[in-house]
Amino acid sequence: MKLSRSAGVLMHVTSLWGSDSVGCFGKEAREFVDFLSDCGFGWWQVLPFCMADECNSPYRSYSAFGGNPYLVDIRQLAEAGYLTYAEIQLAKQDTPYACEFDKLEVGRMNLLRIAAARASEADRAEIAAFIDNNPYLAQFCEFMARRAANGNKPWYEWGNDEMDEVERFTWQFIQFHFMRQWEAVRAYANSKGVRIMGDIPIYVAYDSCDVWANRDLFDLDEKGAPRHVAGCPPDYFSEDGQLWGNPLYDWKRMKEDNFAWWSARMKHMLSLFDGVRIDHFRGLEAYWSIPADAETAREGKWVKGPGNPFIRQLHNVVDEVETATGKGALVVAEDLGEATESLEKFVKASGFPGMRVMQFGFDGDPENTHLPYNYVKNCVAYTGTHDNNTLLGFVWDCDKETRRKVLHYCGYTQDNWDCRESYRAVIRTLMASCADLAILPVQDLLLYGSDCRMNVPGRAKGNWEFRITREQLDGIDRGYFRYLNELYGRIEYPKSTDNQTVI
């Protein structure tokens, strides 16, 4: 898909409002699509749909393919007769302002097990056919069933080869309804002129179906333990670097079958979304390899990644998907971090749009690629990502001189700092830039501060919980954002409104 001039909003599905403990694929998702359409936004960007880890991060999961059970709308299951009204009342949220992960951990899977147990024979036949057509999801369901039979221990600590058949069907039931519900949301979004951008974490967790079932594709020793793990080198933000701990791919082995596992992964993601962002794209050009027994990432070294042969195969997959569906498929390269000449050439040669983040642009370097006057058309530009502070939090936390530089750059030169008007100046600067796609986190539409961040990298707890209410969404000036999208040519078919907000 060639990028067209457009704009979008970054918000994960879990942040949607609703009556239960987490946002899901219910009517609220369609209402959010209506909001995007009213504002003239053409994209909704979400975070990974896979299961989250013990810290609720969707970037470490039991499967690169399996869907997060929490995103399944239990109210639709009740309407279909799998759950009773009394049962779903027990799942009702206690607070509307945050995801209740502790409550979900205790009760949601049990509720889904009850629903699965009520599946009819016809349901089971339909689900079996679905699973037969999705072998990697079948693999994931088997993995979770074997994990349950082994006391939910990591696969490398399993003591038997048993499998809980009831648990396997529960996971098959979940994946079937996950896909069916999401397909309906995506179809509705597309009908309203809104496309969905998903997110692909480059690495997978060691305790995952992906490693368990495909050990020959990873850098493991004869006992199945990682030889080297992923991370990033020391930099301005961390003197010891970051030790992520994910097992590394055996790229030489993957190349032998033309990257079949990755091809299947990309094809699956493009069956879910109209476009995908590949996280840590630089790891495909060169990656930081750390000995598995290292205490810090300092002990790592750069190793060449799969490079252009891998990129060519990604293009083959995209071409195949586009031919089969008759629709374009977008791939975005998350090329943030330390810039190198070889990385820049790699991203440019890939043809995939890279990323720009305004918050990174004001370090005093006039050639900083994150300064809007240095943007290229083929890029996706953000005020900030899910890992950044909110726009208001960023401006608030800046030292006085940097704040002045940011606001003056964006045309706000008043002596008194007016939060609303200054933040609008920054947003207008992003929207007016030459970047083909401009993305605003929903927190920046709401003018929320740093207490509403989605994630603080390096912090173990308190992340991923951000959630909005319907009342908060209704407080956003839809006419203003439609006006910006029309003014800066980011809406495909501009439609005048009687109540346009003009500055």
Image: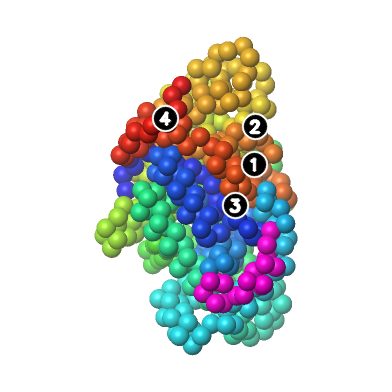
* Disc 2/disc 4 C-alpha distance (Å): 28 Å
Residues in magenta, as a range: 77-93
The picture quadrant where one finds residue 18 is: bottom right
Nearer-N-terminus badge (3/4):
3
* Disc 2/disc 3 C-alpha distance (Å): 23 Å
Q: From the image, state whether disc 3 or disc 4 is nearer to you.
A: 4
* Disc 3/disc 4 C-alpha distance (Å): 27 Å
Q: Residue at x 51, y 74 (%)?
A: 80
The picture quadrant where one finds residue 373 is: top left
Residue that label 2 marks: 393
Residue that label 3 marks: 17
Q: Residue at x 55, y 77 (%)?
A: 81
Q: Are marks 1 and 4 in contact (CB under 8 Å)?
A: no
Front-lying residue, 417 or 52: 417
The residue furthest front is: 498
* Disc 1/disc 3 C-alpha distance (Å): 16 Å
Residue that label 1 marks: 453
Residue that label 4 marks: 500
Q: Residue at x 72, y 57 (%)?
A: 94
Q: Amino acid at mark 1?
A: Arg
Magenta highlight on residue 464:
no
Q: Amino acid at mark 3?
A: Trp
Q: Are marks 3 and 4 in contact (CB under 8 Å)?
A: no
Q: Secondary structure at mark 2?
A: helix
Q: Is residue 57 left or right of residue 124?
A: right
Q: Residues within 10 Å of mark 2 (few under 14, many from 20)?
A: some
Q: Residue at x 35, y 54 (%)?
A: 191
Q: Are marks 1 and 2 in contact (CB under 8 Å)?
A: yes
Q: From the image, state whether disc 1 or disc 4 is nearer to you.
A: 4
